[in-house]
Image (cartoon, rainbow, N blue to C red):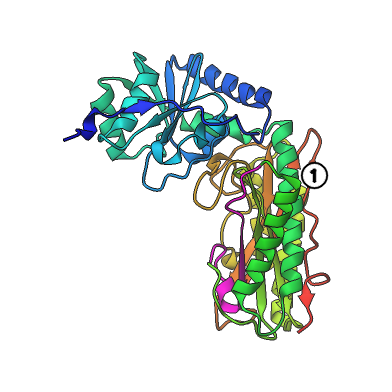
Amino acid sequence: MFDTFDRLETFTSHNGDKASLPFSEAEYDRRLASLRQIMAAQDIGAVVLTSMHNVAYYSGFLYCAFGRPYACVVTADACTTVSANIDAGQPWRRSHGDNVIYTDWKRDNYWRAVGSLVSASARIGIEGDHLTLAARNTMEAMLGERTLIDIAPATMAARMLKSDEEIALIREGARIADVGGYAVRDAIKVGTREIDVAMAGRDAMELEIARAHPDSEIRDSWVWFQSGLNTDGAHNPVTTRALEAGDILSMNTFPMISAYYTALERTLFLGEPDADSLRIWKANVAAHKLGLSLIKPGISCSAICAEINRFFADEGLLQYRSFGYGHSFGVLSHYYGREAGLELREDIDTVLEAGMVVSMEPMLWVPEGQPGAGGYREHDILVVGDDGAENIAGFPYGPDANIVAA
């Protein structure tokens, strides 16, 4: 009988030609040079990146795990993605650099592939916020005694400063988010379900991505469109609820171009809002405008948060604040990535500088049964420059623009 364990543990397959990646060769080389500076400063011989966002950031390849581990191994002279045989040659085509495929014939072939790439490196960089305890135990058992260094904070800091190419792609994402927003607004009417409105926005964005970025992978764009009680959470899923006259509405469009997240979020009403709802909405819009004016180089995230908190306190609304006032952009989605060091919260003291891209997104949540009940949120994207910040969201906000006739 054929012994499956005699089959290849790892192999390479350059199946087809390299695909067009979202950024130039020079951009990926720049990122890798920055990572190698981090490695040199900490005397690290090899880095094993395991998160979707870091693998994509340094190699261009956005993996689909589906229960299997993936990696990007970076050494002083190589960048190699490690992928499962189920994906065949696609990871090589989508990688800046080399690729090694591991097979399923024997348990832990993934770590055999990783081990062959890190070679005899005594100090290995890992992502401490991603590598699970089980994976770390297996890594240590398979690779032998090594010193593991957490490089996640350093790579996060590197990703927070965007290159010109990244900013250009983020601008495109903001433009396409607006396309989705207009499609959503056009689909709003009494009796229409949340899911129907959401699909209109998603379809419009995906069609525009396919037109404007035909070489990109078309995946992961989505819309959260919430109504009535369902507006209370920023990340509440879409439902089949039918819209009713007088509803508060929350529109959230998220086009994904090659793993780069952008967002447009707006409060709307289906018909005229009552006086309490209008007061709270206007207050949140005023906080949004204040926040936009604060974003500039030299101010800290916590200082921005303190100013908006002060405004809401003066309005008697601070108790309804739902979460922090903004975050960084880049390689992230609702299921991978986060540059937690650049969030507009009380406990983040990072100082804004040119090249950062952040949102301004105040939200108030008034519980059901109280006057003006619902979730109110506006969201714009700002590119921080040398002297100020540029708002790259184009969709209008506030009562003058977003009351839809019932």
Query: Height in image: 50 above or below 291?
Result: above
Residue 385 percent across, percent down from the top left: 77, 36
According to the picture, the residue beneath numbered tag 1 turns out to be 390
Could you say which quadrant of the image residue 234 lies in?
A: bottom right
Residue 227 is covered by the magenta coloring: yes
Tell me if residue 253 comes above or below residue 57 in the rendering.
below
How far across and down, in percent of the image, does residue 195 sit? 59, 72
Q: Is residue 48 visible in the rendered structure shown here?
A: yes
| Kind of residue at disc 1 | Glu
Residue 160 as seen in the image, left or right of residue 186: left
Quarter of the image for the N terminus: give it: top left
Circle 1 — which element? strand
> Horizontal and vertical percent for residue 396?
80, 62
- Magenta extent: 216-236
Q: Residues within 10 Å of mark 1 (few under 14, many from 20)?
A: some
Question: Which quadrant of the view contains residue 193?
Answer: bottom right
Q: In the image, residue 324 lies at what x, y percent?
A: 58, 54
Residue 353 visible in the shown view: no
